Image: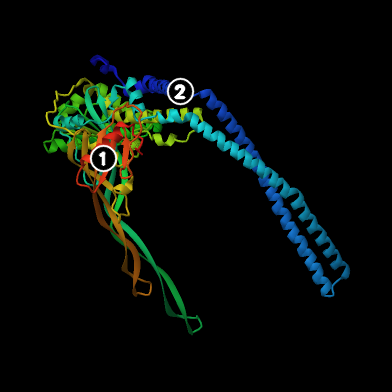
């Protein structure tokens, strides 16, 4: 896009009129290309699906029929039992010198009806159930056979899905941003050196997924992180107590009675809590000294124009008060004349008015007002923090997921259902990514600014530490977790060394053991006495374990040859990487390196 095009660019309007449809069309064309390349026969699958649905319909009808037959069988069994009870009552009447005619009639009626119901159950209902059950069994067998055929028909297509599908479609679409196949170590180093980004996450954070790319030529990374937070948890316990009291009977006398009370006690203790969150981290050298924070405004576009005016009026007063306070203290805060933007964006903690106005031109203000106050898929759900050359976007819509889960398509048997769900998921992921980046796309200066020249001189790993950490989080949990751990684990990686084309990492697993404790909390009852109420709580004791993995990049295409097999090798594949689990070994020895190399070269047959 030429620089002058940014002067009219509106991210919301572009998405609604161009971007959304263009991506959807590109995704559908890409899916058709995958279908063609996988060489599956769509017509054959449709014919098989037709048979499956016909069998499903027959099975449903047969199931209803069998339920009715079994219901009637149960009903007649009950009547049979009642009939014999009537006959037994008749016998009791006769034995007990009751009415002779009544007793005989009840015996005859009961026995005849009971035998009749037995014959009806045995000769008709059981026979019908048996015959229909055989038909059902045969239909189920045919249904499972056709289902397996349909799954096999789609297997080549499903097996061709990769994480790069989404990357390829995004990059084919005119979004004003592109995605990388993977986050390279050079980009992480660039964010560090040019934009002062500290790539080291805290010990309480573990990276689950990572995407990276560029908005024009400026880099961004998108992270999904598992966070552990330790805070107090309140536990509750109860105890029922009783005591005897003497009360007046109202007639001058007294009597004793027992009163009971359920005492409730609370006890607080530190506990570990886990949750996922996502961030976009974007580097741009425009307005290099500016710092500010904005959070979702709370305004909903459904509230209408009248409520928007009330909202702006209310915040305008707060903004004016801040301006007056700043002036009285010799501060520099000066509101922008566009009070709609000031009220909705509401970044009042900014530190540089000149650079703030340089960044938020009238077009940027208009774009952000449109993004915040107009109808969009998620509304105003984003936080925006700028710390000099770094920009951090966090949105509620992407807090638990930032990439497609391809495993969900394993076992699909209907091509049309697969296509529909696959494209819907891809469109959802595009929308989520687009509106995570939209606040940045709203600012023309960001699109017009290019980063300084960066040439990494130091030796780098083959795999970035972020991709490596995401990788181990996709491996089996039991490979790393401490045997006493009773909470989720936080995995942290440290680079050890590189050997040929392989990186070796130390994997540190941090978790907690939970030990049950009982606290006795004093509580005063209604009788004035103090009782100890037991409260069960858990002590969280840190546990950790250190293991090692080796990782290497995988070539995208290799020849199919017989795979090397070794029972002692645990290997995985993720994106364009392969891993070898080293466990407690000191390093990647020559034997295992040779095995790992053979595994990589032999088409990853052993990778789980």
Would residue 413 be seen by someone viewing this image from the given angle? no
Q: Which dot marks residue 39?
A: 2
Residue 307 is situated, as x and y percent measured from the top left of the image, at 37, 33
Image quadrant containing the N terminus: top left
Mark 2 residue crowding within 10 angstroms, few (<14) / some (14–19) / many (20+): few
163 or 157, which lies in front? 157
Q: Quadrant of residue 145?
A: top right
Residue 573 is situated, as x and y percent measured from the top left of the image, at 32, 36
Q: Secondary structure at mark 2?
A: loop
337 or 546, which lies in front? 546
Q: Is residue 323 left or right of residue 63?
A: left
Q: Which residue is mark 1?
A: 469
Report the colour scheme.
rainbow
Image quadrant containing the C terminus: top left
Q: Is residue 422 left or right of residue 495?
A: right
Residue 462 is situated, as x and y percent measured from the top left of the image, at 21, 32
In this view, the residue farthest toward the right is: 101
Q: Secondary structure at mark 1?
A: helix
24 or 256, which lies in front? 24
Mark positioned earlier in the residue sequence (1 or 2): 2
Q: Which dot marks residue 186?
A: none
Q: Quadrant of residue 23?
A: top left
Residue 584 is situated, as x and y percent measured from the top left of the image, at 23, 49
């Amino acid at each position: 896009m030429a620089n002058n095009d940014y002067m009219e660019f509106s991210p919301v309007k572009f998405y609604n009129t161009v971007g959304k449809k263009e991506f959807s069309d590109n995704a559908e064309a890409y899916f058709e290309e995958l279908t063609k390349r996988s060489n599956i026969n769509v017509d054959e699958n449709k014919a098989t699906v037709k048979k499956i649905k016909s069998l499903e319909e027959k099975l449903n009808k047969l199931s209803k029929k069998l339920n009715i037959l079994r219901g009637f069988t149960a009903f007649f069994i009950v009547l049979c039992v009642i009939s014999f009870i009537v006959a037994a009552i008749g016998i009791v009447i006769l034995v007990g010198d009751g009415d002779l005619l009544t007793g005989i009639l009840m015996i005859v009626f009961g026995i005849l009806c009971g035998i009749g119901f037995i014959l009806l159950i045995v000769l008709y209902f059981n026979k019908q159930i048996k015959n229909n059950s055989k038909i059902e069994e045969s239909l189920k067998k045919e249904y499972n056979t056709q289902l397996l055929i349909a799954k096999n028909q789609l297997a080549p297509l499903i097996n061709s899905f990769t994480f790069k599908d989404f990357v390829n479609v995004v990059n084919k679409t005119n979004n004003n941003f592109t995605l990388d196949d993977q986050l390279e170590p050079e980009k992480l180093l660039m964010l560090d050196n040019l934009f002062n980004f500290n790539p080291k996450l805290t010990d309480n954070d573990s990276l689950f997924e990572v995407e990276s790319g560029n908005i024009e030529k400026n880099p961004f990374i998108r992270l999904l992180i598992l966070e552990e937070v330790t805070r107090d948890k309140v536990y509750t316990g109860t105890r029922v107590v009783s005591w005897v009291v003497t009360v007046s009977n109202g007639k001058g006398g007294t009597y004793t009675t027992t009163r009971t009370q359920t005492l409730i006690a609370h006890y607080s203790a530190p506990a570990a809590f886990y949750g996922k969150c996502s961030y976009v981290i974007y580097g741009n050298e425009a307005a290099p000294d500016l710092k500010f924070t904005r959070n979702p405004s709370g305004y909903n576009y459904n509230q209408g124009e009248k409520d928007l005016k009330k909202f702006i009026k209310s915040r305008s007063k707060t903004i004016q008060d801040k301006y007056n306070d700043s002036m009285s203290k010799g501060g520099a805060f000066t509101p922008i004349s566009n009070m709609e933007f000031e009220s909705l964006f509401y970044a009042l903690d900014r530190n540089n008015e000149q650079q703030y106005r340089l960044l938020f031109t009238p077009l940027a203000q208009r774009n952000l007002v449109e993004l915040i106050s107009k109808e969009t898929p998620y509304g105003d759900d984003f936080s925006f923090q700028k710390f000099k050359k770094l920009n951090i976007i966090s949105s509620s819509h992407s807090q638990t997921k930032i990439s497609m889960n391809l495993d969900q398509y394993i076992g699909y048997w209907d091509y049309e259902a697969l296509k529909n769900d696959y494209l819907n998921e891809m469109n959802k992921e595009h929308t989520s990514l687009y509106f995570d980046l939209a606040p940045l796309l709203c600012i023309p200066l960001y699109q017009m600014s290019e980063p300084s020249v960066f040439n990494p001189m130091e030796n780098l790993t083959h795999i970035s530490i972020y991709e490596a950490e995401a990788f181990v989080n996709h491996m089996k949990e039991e490979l790393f977790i401490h045997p006493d751990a009773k909470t989720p684990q936080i995995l942290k990686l440290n680079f050890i060394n590189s050997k040929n084309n392989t990186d070796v990492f130390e994997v540190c697993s941090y978790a907690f053991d939970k030990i049950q404790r009982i606290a006795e909390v004093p509580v005063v009852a209604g009788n004035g006495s103090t009782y100890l109420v037991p409260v069960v709580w858990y002590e969280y004791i840190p546990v950790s374990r250190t293991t090692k993995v080796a990782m290497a990049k995988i070539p995208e295409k290799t020849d199919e040859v017989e795979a090397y097999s070794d029972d002692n090798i645990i290997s995985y594949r993720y994106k364009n990487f392969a891993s070898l689990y080293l466990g407690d070994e000191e390093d990647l020895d020559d034997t295992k390196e040779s095995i790992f190399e053979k595994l990589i070269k032999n088409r990853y047959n052993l990778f789980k």
